[in-house]
Amino acid sequence: MEVRLARKRGFCFGVEDAIETAERTLREHEPGRVVALGPVIHNPQVVDRLEQAGLNQSGDLERIQPGTTVLIRSHGAGPDTYAEAARKELNIVDATCVLVKRAQTVVRQLHEEGYTVVMIGDANHPEVRGVIGYAPNVIVVDSEDKLDDVLPIRGKLGIVAQTTHAPEHVAHMIGEIARRPFRELRVINTLCLEVVRRQEAAVELAGEVDVMFVLGGHHSANTQELARLCCEAGVPTYHLETWAEFKPDMVRGKRIAGVTAGASTPDFTIDEFVEKLKSLVPEER
C-alpha cells in the first residue's frame, strides 16, 4: 500500500525536553525516589517506558514522603502545587513546557493589569487546570453556548487559549466573545506553533489520500484535534495509539494512506505503523 507521511508529525520540543528531564532525573536519583505528578506526557507507551525505568507517576502529592523528588509534568501545575511541595520539603524538578509556562505568566500579568481572564480551552485538561491557577476567577470556555451566562457585562477581558487548540476554533471563539458587550478586549496568542504546524500538515495530507491514520494517545488533546481536523477535511480518519489497534477493514478499497502523529507520539510508534502498513498485500486490503 502507498503510505504518505505528514511533513510535520510526532514529538515537539516541549515533549522531548520533558522526557529528557525525566530520564536525567531518574539517572541522578535512587530507584523509587522520583515521583511525577501524573503522566509526564499523554502517551501510554512512553509512560510505560518511564515507569519501567523507575518513575512513579501516581500524581498523589498528599502521599509523597519528605525528601522525595517531584517531577512537574509537561502540562505544568498551578502555584498551589509548588507551594504544597515546598511545604512538604520535596525536591522539585520542573518539566513544564516553556509555552505552557508562558501561558501561566500571561494569565498572571493580565490579572495584575486588571483584566478578567478568559481561557479558551478544555476545563478538564491538566494544562488548563494548571494555567488558571495563576489568577483568581479565570473563566474557561470552549463553546459559545454559555458565553452570555459567564462573561461579565462590559468587562475588561483578557483572552488566552489552551496551547494545543486549533487556530480556527480559537478565532471562532474570539469572534463570539467580541459579539458580546465588553469594555475592552485584549487577546494574547498562547497557541503552540509546533502544534499548529502539525495541524496544517495533517489537513494538507488529508486532501491527498484515501484514508488518514492519526497516531497518539487517546487522551492526548493535540492528537484528538488532529483527528478532528482530518475528519472535517472529509477523509475517513482513524485515531489509533499503535498498530495493535489497526484492522484490515480500515484500508479495504483504499489505495493511498496518510499517516500523522500527535506531539507526544514517539518515532518508534510511527515507524512500526508505517512499515507494517506498507507491507500489506492486496488480499489483506
Image (cartoon, rainbow, N blue to C red):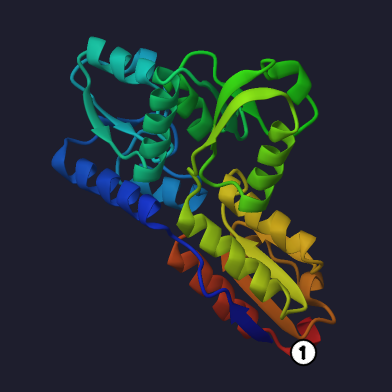
Q: For the N terminus, which image quadrant?
A: bottom right
Residue in the picture at 39% in, 18% down: 112
82 left or right of 165?
left
| Of residues 112 and 281, the one drawn nearer to the viewer in this rendering | 112
Q: Tag 1's secondary structure?
A: helix
Return the residue found at the far left. 28
Return the residue found at the far right. 253
Residue 265 visible in image: no
Q: Which residue is mark 1?
A: 282
| Of residues 257 and 133, the one drawn nearer to the viewer in this rendering | 133
Residue in the picture at 21% in, 47% down: 24
Residue in the picture at 57% in, 73% down: 6
Report x, y in % for residue 106: 41, 32
Q: Is residue 213 above or below residue 27?
A: below
Kind of residue sitting beneath label 1: Pro
Q: Mark 1, residues whose alpha carbon is within 10 Å: few (<14), some, or many (≥20)?
A: few
Q: Quadrant of residue 69?
A: top left
Residue 114 visible in image: yes
Q: For the C terminus, which image quadrant?
A: bottom right
| Of residues 129 and 101, the one drawn nearer to the viewer in this rendering | 101
Q: Quadrant of residue 41?
A: top left
Report x, y in % for residue 212: 70, 70
Report x, y in % for residue 211: 75, 73
Report x, y in % for residue 146: 77, 24
209 left or right of 130?
right
Residue in the picture at 54% in, 47% down: 164
211 left or right of 105?
right
282 left or right of 86?
right
| Of residues 140 and 44, the one drawn nearer to the viewer in this rendering | 140
Return the residue found at the far top. 87
Q: Is residue 158 above or below residue 202?
A: above
